[in-house]
Amino acid sequence: MQLPKSSQLASRLEWRESAGSTNLELIQLAGTEQLPNFTVYATANQVAGRGRSGRVWETPANSALAISVLLHPPMSSPADLGKLGWLPLIAGLAMSRTVASVLGTNSGNASVPSPKVGLKWPNDVLVNEHKICGVLTELVGNSVVIGAGINLTQTQEQLPIPTATSLLLQGALLPTALAESFDLVLSTYLQNLSELYNRFINLGLDAVASGVRQQIIDGCITLGREVRAELPDGTSVLGRAATIDDTGRLVLDVNGQVMPLSAADIVHLRH
Ligand code: BT5
């Protein structure tokens, strides 16, 4: 498949006609040879996509992209490991901007209301409250694989849950040639991801000084919402999502008490 724009942005582009899980296959490849920072492993036919906590990511062939990017963040101390928690948020914001930009090509058409695109903490991109992308980040030694699944042309019937959506369902005018539409979405994402990632690492993985935290806050539609946080221990808590703190945690206001969360599934309760 010819992907000229994406090939220019990746240090190395490994495109596969089909793959099990792109994250897993990139991790396996990285175990057999030295891969450069920003190696990209992608397919439009992922047959064993993984979500978080053992969940699955399901996409019919040629209707969605599965993209995994290998990063070697420069780390100068063990404390830097904790800063890698920003990477899923960075990837989510990069994809959120990608979706907004692809949908924005319709903005000349006044009959199509502009969709509300944003990042749902910690790893989803939503369009009008429907999930269009999920991010799964995995640590491999001191390197990171960031996986993103983005729905392109599924119909509602082809999506696994009623609250999922695709670019096509949201009215995107994608190029009719498959390769062109894959290259458009992949290259826009890689461009957005590299801009944010470089800004972050150039300031020593400092999300605050680099302005990355503020950009994530600005793009995060969870903030200000009443939410239910489902915690890893099986309990859940209700509160208002107040902010994202200096370490990337979602800070809930629970009846006036501050509760920072580093891992949780968030349900947006009302508009
Ligand atoms: C995620 O997990 O959303 C992370 C998905 C990451 C997928 C990428 S694709 C490239 C890379 N390689 C992989 O193997 N994985 C990554 P989580 O937050 O756990 O959400 C999973 C839930 O999303 C499922 O339980 C479904 O409810 C829903 N879901 C599954 N497929 C979906 C789809 N295509 N669109 C929207 N929602 C989906």
Image: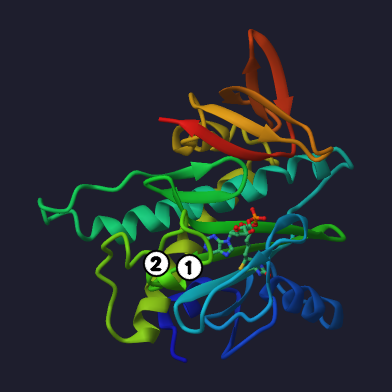
Quadrant in the rendering for residue 156: bottom left
Is the CB of the residue bearing disc 1 within 8 angstroms of ligand 1?
A: yes
The quadrant of the rendering that contains the C terminus is top left
Outermost top residue: 256
| Residue picked out by circle 2 | 156
Q: Is 26 left, or right, of 203 in this rendering? A: right
Residues marked 2 and 1 touching at CB (< 8 Å): yes
Against 247, residue 123 (above or below) is below
Amino acid on which disc 2 is placed = Gln
- Residue appearing at x 51%, y 28% in the figure: 223
Q: Distance of mark 2 from mark 1, alpha carbons?
A: 5 Å
Can residue 98 be seen from the camera position used here?
A: yes
Q: Is 13 left, or right, of 136 in this rendering? A: left
Q: Secondary structure at mark 2?
A: helix
Is the CB of the residue bearing disc 2 within 8 angstroms of ligand 1?
A: no
- Residue appearing at x 71%, y 31% in the figure: 247
Q: Which mark is residue 228?
A: none
Q: Crowding at label 1, few (<14), some or many (≥20) Cα neighbours within 10 Å?
A: some
Quadrant in the rendering for residue 260: top right
Q: Name the spot of residue 145 as percent of width and height, x first.
A: 71, 63
Against 67, residue 116 (above or below) is above
Q: Name the spot of residue 133 as percent of width and height, x first.
A: 51, 58
Q: Which mark is residue 159?
A: 1
